[in-house]
Amino acid sequence: MTHQVHIIGGGLAGSEAAWQLAEAGIKVRLSEMRGGGEKTAAHQTEDLAELVCSNSFRSDDADRNAVGLLHQELRTLGSLIMKSADAHRVPAGSALAVDRDGYTEAVTQALAAHPNVTLVRERIDALPEGPAIIATGPLTGSALAEAIATETGEDALAFFDALAPIVHHESVDMETAWMASRWDKGDTKDYINCPMDKDQYLAFHDALITGEKGEFKEWEANTPYFDGCMPIEVMAERGVDTLRHGPMKPVGLDNPKTGRWPYAVVQLRQDNALGTLWNMVGFQTKLKHAEQVRVFRMIPGLENAQFARLGGLHRNTFIKSPKLLDGSLRLKSRPHIRFGGQITGCEGYIESAAVGLLAARFWIDELAGRDPSLPPLETSLGALLSHITGGADAETFQPMNVNFGLFPPLPERSRKADRKQLYTDRGRAALADWLSPQASASSLSEVAG
């Protein structure tokens, strides 16, 4: 099968882009180097759209949360990533968390079976010559990264991304820990909570700071962390109470043994459908493996913890998208190439899938002879795209999760308590207008005129 669009990278962005194009009747070649004798520093499997850091897509609340609104928008647009996530979700309160294996297997099988997709396990080292989407993510191979840098004349920015440990449920002492969601949201039993008193917390805080850390390679020196995946020990260095106001905050968690909030809490979130694996929430780390076992077993309830995966650290790269890409994600110097996913400077699983989806939709328009139809700024999709392609200064550009700070301000004064609902109501209306046949016909007539 000859292809019309070549997609490089089988992560969330590349997988979503391939699905959107294939469903539109466009032939796709999807190149993924894992499975072709290549590995990365972070991936564990050869499945497409593998989840590396966490199994959570964050909030699924489409009424008061920007990422929840993004979930809803992607569902409306026929997202494979969201369809697979919904089919393999596990309890996580108001968040959307998934069974990793079931989710990635569903994505892989759907694409491998699609008649318009040719999945090839191969490494691509040079920029493609025909219509393409580069969605190689934060772990882009060195040869391709060099080719991008040579073409653009720009050094890629970089930051560190850290992985959280995963614990076997049977090794958690449930006589000490208890099941509950913060403020009793969800079914109230979505998280395992491990309480600490003040002395235990202070000893744990000291152990995080003094624990032996992994050493940086020479090429990793002076690379900044992304705040959304800050290692737990780096947060601890910012102040003795930083963790108590962050991933270890006890607010809204009544310990049934005391009837009161603990001094600090470590939460674990279900990581697979069977409930046998639990992720330490917010505990990304660069501690050495032996130190992780020693320090994390100081947590009450985890004294005998068995770890299915220990934490780790890897280097991410992304391009200066506001300078290098046009409004429809095309590389300005080579307009036949679009970029999608985290390499563009979005951050987060679902944001990555969303930018892959947009890159595909823009190709669908272009191959049909239409100007790309950009999503309204009032939508999560539009706000995220605007940040990537022009909403930030290229020299200070940093990865960003979707959030209401990227949206246009509300047009009239409103109560603070109502603003999130107003943002999401406006976003849903804008998406409906964008997708309506009348709006599409109007847009095409304007282009023709």
Image (cartoon, rainbow, N blue to C red):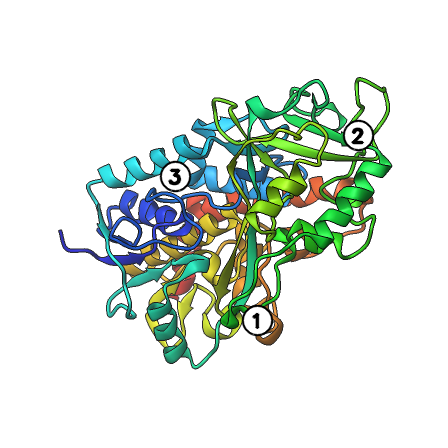
| Residue type at numbered disc 3 | Leu
Eyeballing the image, is 247 above or below 394? above
**Chain-order first, disc 2 or disc 1:** 1
- Residue 144 appears left or right of 87: left
Residue on which disc 2 sits: 252
Q: Position of residue 186 (x, y in %)?
A: 65, 24
- SS at mark 2? loop
Spatial separation of the CA atoms under disc 3 and disc 1: 38 Å
Residue 80: image tag: 3
Spatial separation of the CA atoms under disc 2 and disc 3: 35 Å
Pointer 3 local density, CA inside 10 Å: few below 14, some 14–19, many at least 20 = many
Q: Position of residue 64 (x, y in %)?
A: 68, 39
Q: Quadrant of residue 194?
A: top right
Q: Nearer the viewer, mark 3 or mark 1?
A: 1
Residue on which disc 1 sits: 221
Pointer 1 local density, CA inside 10 Å: few below 14, some 14–19, many at least 20 = few
Q: Position of residue 251 (x, y in %)?
A: 81, 34
| Residue type at numbered disc 2 | Gly
Eyeballing the image, is 344 above or below 54? below
Towards the viewer: 171 or 335: 171
Q: Nearer the viewer, mark 2 or mark 3?
A: 2
Eyeballing the image, is 236 above or below 132? above
Specify the quadrant that holds the C terminus.
bottom left
| Residue type at numbered disc 1 | Ala
- Residue 245 appears left or right of 69: right
Towards the viewer: 211 or 316: 211
Q: Number of callouts in the render?
A: 3
